Amino acid sequence: MRDLSNELLDWYDVHARKMPWRVGPADRKAGVRPDPYAVWMSEIMLQQTTVAAVTEYFKRFLSRWPTVTDLATAEDSEVMGEWAGLGYYARARNLLKCARAVVADHDGAFPADHAVLLKLPGIGPYTAAAIASIAFGLRHVVVDGNVERVMARMFDEHTPLPASKPILTEHADKLTPQNRPGDHAQAVMDLGATICTPKSPACGICPWRDPCKARAAGTAPELPKKTPKKAKPVRHGTVYLAQRSDGAWLVETRPDKGLLGGMMGWPGSDWVDTSQPRPLNAPLETDWIKLEGEVRHTFTHFHLILDVMVATVSNTEPERGYYLPRDKFRPSDLPTVMRKAFDLAQK
């Protein structure tokens, strides 16, 4: 297994992807060490999101909050606003909680200990392993979707995901070296992202071409197997966009817990299944106009369809929400689904 790891690291030294949070092989050899803060930030952002989507967000966050101490002292609303568009907003809330815990409990330095990392808010087994391995050079097994695909093909494993996760992790463990475990983890990820891709893997140029059992068996394109997902349910709701005569918008801050927690949004109804009547709990009494068209958005577990109601109001006090002055309102601070409603209202 050591030879396989060395072969992959040799390939990585030449073909490593360039990313703003990564210390590449050449810099590593020159003595540059990864910044644990940057590694942590990138791993949180990359959860269920692509490298392409994350890159500009990462650059903005690191420019605005260069250290974990800077982030820990940031206003919640500012961080949530910068996060808008990345989705999975619980990650942003945990980002702040974790930064504040690192400053309060660890003197502003991420601990070089896998077990201690696991105790920080928002850091699970994968993220702890990635930080420990990539930032601190500790030998831990890092397994994401790319790694699972590479392992399933290397060992021709046909047990469907997610049941095969322990098996694939065991395979990855066998291949993880004591030397350069962080580079090895990133190398396997790069292999999965650039060569051992979900469709049409480029087996002819793969550094692990010869030992790959699925390539030899001709089964690589069909792996990993996956248990079929259940169809996502569809939910419906209504949002209310009211603008005061002075340009202020009626908005609300959503509860910390739940979808879009802590984010600014439009007052609206509950999101309910199509089989149930749609409650209309407008935030104030006025002449609402229903816009043509609708907002469609997909969350992890369901599809959402929203009707959009608009109105121009005077100084009527709302039952829900508050008026945000025109010069304080930035559409970019809205989560994506709420931004879609705003964009529809602007047409």
Image (tube, helix red, strand yellow):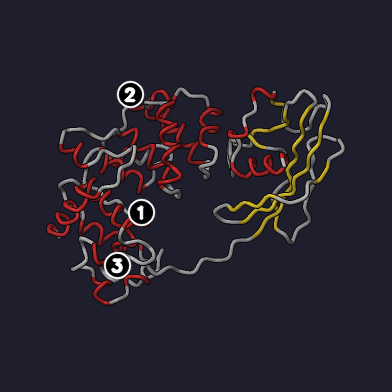
On residue 277, which mark appears? none
Image point 27% across, 54% down: which residue?
Answer: 188
**Which sits in the foreground, 314 or 75?**
314
Q: Tell me whether the residue at label 2 lies in contact with that at label 3, contact meaning CB atoms closer than 8 angstroms.
A: no
Image point 32% across, 56% down: which residue?
Answer: 194
Q: Would you place residue 160 above or below residue 193 in this image?
A: below
The quarter of the picture where residue 225 lies is bottom left
Neighbour class for label 3 at 10 Å: few (<14), some, many (≥20)?
many
Give the residue at the far left of this rendering.
Answer: 3
Neighbour class for label 2 at 10 Å: few (<14), some, many (≥20)?
few
Picture coordinates of residue 206, whole percent (x, y): 24, 62
On residue 153, which mark appears? 3
Picture coordinates of residue 105, whole percent (x, y): 36, 27
Q: Is residue 302 left or right of residue 138?
A: right
On residue 107, which mark appears? 2
Q: Would you place residue 225 above or below residue 90 in this image?
A: below
Mark 1 falls on what kind of element?
A: loop
Q: CA distance from mark 1 to mark 3?
A: 14 Å
Number of numbered discs visible in the structure rendering: 3
